[in-house]
Image: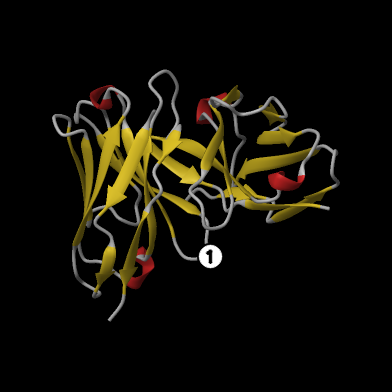
Amino acid sequence: EVQLVESGGGLVQPGGSLRLSCVASGFTFSSHSMHWVRQAPGKGLVWVSCMKGDGSFTAFADSVKGRFAISRDNAKNTLYLQMNSLTAEDTGVYYCTRGPTTVASPADYWGQGTLVAVSS
Amino acid sequence: QTVVTQEPSFSVSPGGTVTLTCALSSGSVSTSYYPSWYQQTPGQAPRTLIYNTNIRSSGVPDRFSGSILGNKAALTITGAQADDECFYYCVLSMGSGTWVFGGGTQLTVL
């Protein structure tokens, strides 16, 4: 069974940093691109970032470019999102998603999400 | 910046058919945008319904189908049920590995 479990969310002050983790199980982690998608309270989904299975390619939404970094440790089946210079607009639930191998898509499976709150 | 547009809300009668759409602020949606569709009940993680225009995700009933209609991506739900009442989101590939979600459609079944 595919499982994605996010952690690392919490309350952080504006300008602060936070690192999210997503532990994957039930599939060959290194074969899949992985993505982060966020959702502000009461708002819609926003794609944030992705990394190819072998770590050779990354992409970011313009709203986080230069502030967020994505990485993965395939030996630990773990995806990370390092978030710096956080603002209130970064508040929301952050979902880790798995990209399917055979077609282009940001998500076939979703984690349950971890909540990030940026506030003083 | 490219905006992906969905109907903010839609209503369908139980047992009825509804088509939700996903459009670009400029240009037409084609299969080259690899549209995907997701379903979300408030407080829950999204669930994948459709990817690559018309491929149903595992376990998704064939009441849900994806297509390109004119210049938009479309999600059609047939035989609408009460538990179809939730939010639906589309996402499109913008190239260079980036994706943009639509604002979502709140579907009411009544």
Residue at image point 45% right, 21% down:
A103
Image side of residue A17 versus residue B66, left or right: left
- Along the viewing direction, whichever of B97 and B16 lies nearer the viewer: B16
SS class, disc 1: loop
x and y percentages locating residue B84 in the rendered image: 70, 44
Residue at image point 74% right, 35% down:
B77
Q: Is residue A82 above or below residue A50?
A: below
x and y percentages locating residue B102 in the rendered image: 56, 48
Quarter-of-image position of residue B98: top left
Examine the rendering and report whether any part of residue B84 can be seen: yes
- Along the viewing direction, whichever of A105 and A8 lies nearer the viewer: A8
Tell which subunit mark 1 falls on.
A
x and y percentages locating residue A74 in the rendered image: 17, 30
- Along the viewing direction, whichever of B105 and B21 lies nearer the viewer: B105
Q: Which residue is mark 1?
A: A42
Quarter-of-image position of residue A96: top left
Amino acid type, residue under disc 1 in the picture = Gly
